[in-house]
């Protein structure tokens, strides 16, 4: 477990081997962003004092948001050979309240609770926070980061679809689709190619995939490409152009524009400023 802690927020990281099990307990008194990154794992979230549980299967990572006044826990099992990475960010309740002044902030915050598709911007932010925490960067940075994350969630989450038990039965048929994305990420991937993996027509594939995952096939594929790009930028010495090619972007300028749109900064800024990688 690696941990970074400021007064404004806290960050934890846990890596669970493929096929392994893990549990998340949310920190008391804080709004908690739990980002689980991995391929095809089973979830059993328990939210609320009555600890009513539901079973979920997810294909490619989730963001699990919990409120500070709710007793909650999450158990999960990696069903693929690849590991599950868990990054947990705790933010004080007061940080969110300041963005909802003059509004019924209780209702707005309740809209944030639930399990949502993976947010690549949150992944990038969490990894940056882990690095800066280890480097003992000051409280001012953490305060700004907490405010940014609160504003981002309040603006984006109400427009997303939660992952629910009703969507779980449809996930297994898309495992081959996700595997195909990962195995062919460096090449152009058409919706027709993905539909063929699922044994569906293009129209029915788009409709069902979007219903199950909460994202269109294009949005989902872009998220996979961005997550892979972040990993390469952090862990390799490959040039930005080479990283783009590895992730399916033959044109470096197009890759940089897509990365900035999804992550909020350029690939070079992500490597140099956030992760202190190779220039």
Image: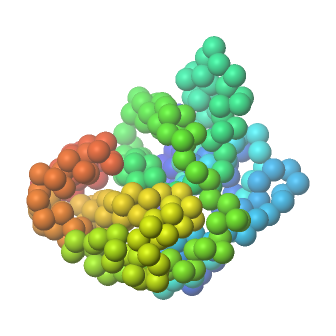
- Is residue 194 positioned above or below 149 on the image? below
Q: What's the colour scheme?
A: rainbow
Q: How many tags in the picture?
A: 0
Seen from the viewer's position, the closer of residues 64 and 220 is 220
- State which quadrant residue 69 falls in: top right
* Residue drawn at 66 percent across, 75 percent down: 169
Q: Residue furthest right?
A: 50
Q: Is residue 250 left or right of residue 217?
A: left
Image x and y of residue 181, in percent? 35, 75
Image x and y of residue 168, in percent? 65, 70
* Residue drawn at 88 percent across, 54 percent down: 50
Seen from the viewer's position, the closer of residues 60 and 171 is 171
Q: Is residue 180 left or right of residue 278?
A: right
Q: Residue furthest top?
A: 102
Seen from the viewer's position, the closer of residues 84 and 132 is 84
Image x and y of residue 100, in percent? 60, 22
- Is residue 218 positioned above or below 124 on the image? below
Image x and y of residue 30, in percent? 65, 40
* Residue drawn at 49 percent across, 70 percent down: 204
Quadrant into which the C terminus falls: bottom left
Q: Evaluate whether residue 171 shows in this view.
A: yes
* Residue drawn at 54 percent across, 47 percent down: 160
Q: Is residue 203 left or right of residue 192?
A: right
- Is residue 153 positioned above or below 33 on the image? above
Q: Is residue 10 left or right of residue 268?
A: right
Q: Evaluate whether residue 18 shows in this view.
A: no
């Amino acid at each position: 477990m690696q941990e970074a802690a400021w007064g404004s927020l806290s960050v934890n990281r846990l890596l669970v081997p493929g096929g392994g099990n893990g549990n998340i307990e949310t920190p008391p008194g804080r709004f908690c962003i739990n980002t689980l990154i991995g391929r095809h794992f089973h979830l059993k979230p328990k939210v609320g004092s009555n600890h009513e549980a539901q079973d979920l299967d997810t294909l490619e990572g989730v963001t699990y948001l919990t409120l500070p006044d709710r007793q909650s826990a999450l158990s999960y099992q990696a069903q693929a050979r690849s590991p599950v990475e868990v990054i947990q960010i705790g933010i004080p309740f007061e940080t969110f309240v300041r963005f909802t002044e003059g509004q019924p902030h209780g209702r707005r915050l309740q809209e944030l609770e639930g399990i949502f598709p993976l947010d690549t911007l949150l992944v990038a932010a969490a990894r940056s926070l882990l690095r800066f925490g280890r480097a003992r960067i000051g409280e001012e940075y953490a305060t700004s980061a907490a405010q940014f994350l609160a504003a981002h969630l309040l603006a984006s989450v109400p427009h997303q679809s939660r992952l629910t038990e009703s969507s779980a039965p449809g996930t297994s048929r898309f495992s081959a689709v996700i595997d195909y994305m990962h195995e062919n990420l460096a090449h152009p991937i058409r919706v027709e190619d993905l539909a063929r993996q699922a044994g569906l027509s293009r129209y029915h594939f788009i409709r069902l995939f979007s219903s199950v995952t909460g994202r269109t096939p294009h949005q989902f594929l872009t998220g996979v490409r961005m997550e892979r790009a972040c990993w390469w930028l952090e862990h390799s010495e490959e040039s930005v152009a080479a990283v783009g090619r590895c992730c399916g972007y033959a044109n470096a300028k197009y890759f940089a524009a897509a990365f900035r749109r999804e992550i909020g900064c350029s690939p070079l800024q992500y490597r140099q400023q956030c992760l202190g990688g190779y220039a």
